[in-house]
Image (cartoon, grey):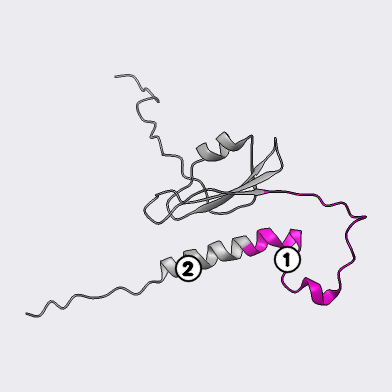
Amino acid sequence: MAYNPYFQTQYQPYMPQPMQGIIWIQGRQAALAYPVGAGQSVILMDSDAPYVYKKETDQNGRPMPMETFKLVKEDSAQIEPLHESDLKGYVKADEVEDIVREEVERRISELSFKPTRKRNTEE
C-alpha cells in the first residue's frame, strides 16, 4: 500500500486563545459569529464602525449576552481640563489591555486551584 499523507492528518477543532489582545473584526455580524471557547471572553474591535464588542461564555460554553460599546471622540475644545483628583476612577487607554489580561489570568487561576472534596469511602 502506498503512503498517503491525507489519511494520516488529524484535524483539531478551532479553539480561540485566552485574551491575547484586541481582535479586529468587520461588522456586528462578524462579532456575533466569532467563536469563544468555554469560560473565555474576548474583546472585538469593529474595523468598519466605532464599536467594541465583548463576548464571553460560561464554563459550559453557553454564550453570555454580547456587550456593545460605542467609541465616542469628544471635541477637546469643549472639555474642561481635569484635575488629578478627578481622575481617580479612570484608567489610561494604554492600561486597559493589561487590566483585562490580569482579570482573565486571575479567573483562570481561581478555576485551576479549586479544592476538591474527597468522598468518605468508609461505610
Q: Residue beneath label 1, please?
A: 91
Q: Nearer the viewer, mark 1 or mark 2?
A: 1
Q: Position of residue 8 (x, y in %)?
A: 36, 30
Residue 67, compared with residue 8, is above or below; it is: below
Q: Is residue 20 left or right of residue 5?
A: right
Other residues around mark 1 within 10 Å, as few (<14) / some (14–19) / many (≥20): few
Q: Is residue 119 magenta-colored?
A: no
Residue at the (72%, 63%) spot, across then down: 95
Q: Residue furthest bottom?
A: 122
Residue most toward the right? 77
Using the image, tell me which numbered label, if any, was put on residue 9.
Answer: none
SS for callout 2: helix
For label 1, the SS is: loop
Magenta-highlighted residues: 70-99
- Residue type for callout 1: Val
* Left or right placement of residue 101 versus residue 15 in this view: right
Which residue is the extreme one toward the left? 123
* Residue that protrudes farthest toward the top in the picture: 2
Decide if residue 77 is on the left or right side of residue 91. Answer: right
Rendering coords of residue 102 (x, y %): 60, 65
Residue 117: image x %, image y %? 26, 75
Q: Which mark is residue 109?
A: 2
Quadrant of the frame with the N terminus: top left
Q: Is residue 82 magenta?
A: yes
* Residue 82 spot, x, y in % from top left: 86, 69
Q: Look at the numbered discs 1 and 2 and tell me whether their residues touch, using CB distance below 8 Å.
A: no
- Label 2 amino acid? Ser
The residue at 53%/68% (across/down) is 106
Q: Is residue 8 above or below residue 107?
A: above
Q: Decide which of tag 1 and tag 2 comes sooner along the chain.
A: 1
Residue appearing at x 75%, y 74% in the figure: 88
